[in-house]
Amino acid sequence: LESDWYITELNQFINWIYDKLERHWIKSDEDKRRKRKFVFGGMEEIVARGVVRGLGKVRVVNRNGVKKMCRNVYAVQQAMGKMEDLEEKWFDKARRYWMFMNLDEKERLRIVQEEYLKDDGDTEGEAAGGEEEDDGYTEEDWRELFKTPEGKTEVNDLLAKLK
């Protein structure tokens, strides 16, 4: 399974910019790091959030489509792999979100309850174990994942706890 054409073009563009920075604009190692961070900083989050929000545009989800989206995320991550300050957590979050689509609704609910809510009933959206976690997902993202009509109380109750 190959990446989509637009991912290939994005990766070529990333590499082109990276090479230009390396050859023409950067003098010292500290300068390289600073300028790379300025140009590419936050791109991981933008890509990951775009991939997650893209689920709302998908009409039908199947296993091959999920694999393709995960492959697209991995391809961009590989293209950006040269950068020292890469925040890979964003790519992992995007892939994990799409992998949820291969599960049935009950399994998705179980995972969200176990991984994103504390066992003691805390409603602050803290991860299990008491450490605060910014999972990068909004309530809208979770609703899209569950395709939640307003009348589904079990899912809506869970989403209210995730706020």
Image (cartoon, rainbow, N blue to C red):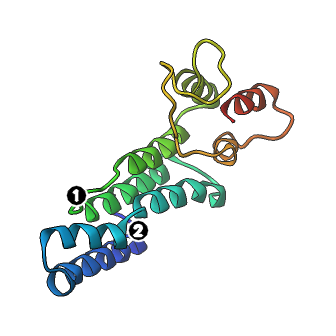
Earlier along the polypeptide chain: callout 2 or callout 1? 2
Q: Amino acid at mark 1?
A: Glu
Residue 155 image position (x, y, % from top left): 73, 30
Q: Is residue 66 left or right of residue 162?
A: left
| Up-down relation of residue 150 to residue 10 (above or below) | above
In which quadrant of the rendered image does the C terminus lie? Answer: top right
* Foreground of the two, 135 or 9: 135
Q: Which mark is residue 4?
A: 2
Dividing the picture into quadrants, the one containing residue 114 is top right
Q: Quadrant of residue 12?
A: bottom left
Location of residue 48 in the rendering, given as x and y in whole percent from the top left corner = 47, 56
Pick the front one: 123 or 48: 123
Give the percent coordinates (x, y) of residue 17: 28, 80
Residue at 24 percent of width and 62 percent of height: 83
Which residue is located at x 66 percent, y 32 percent?
Answer: 162
Say what secondary structure mark 1 lies in.
loop
Q: Secondary structure at mark 2?
A: loop
As drawn, the label of residue 84 is 1
Name the one closer to the observer, 78 or 129. Answer: 129
With 156 as the anchor, is 121 left or right in this view? left
Judged left or right of residue 76, residue 110 is right
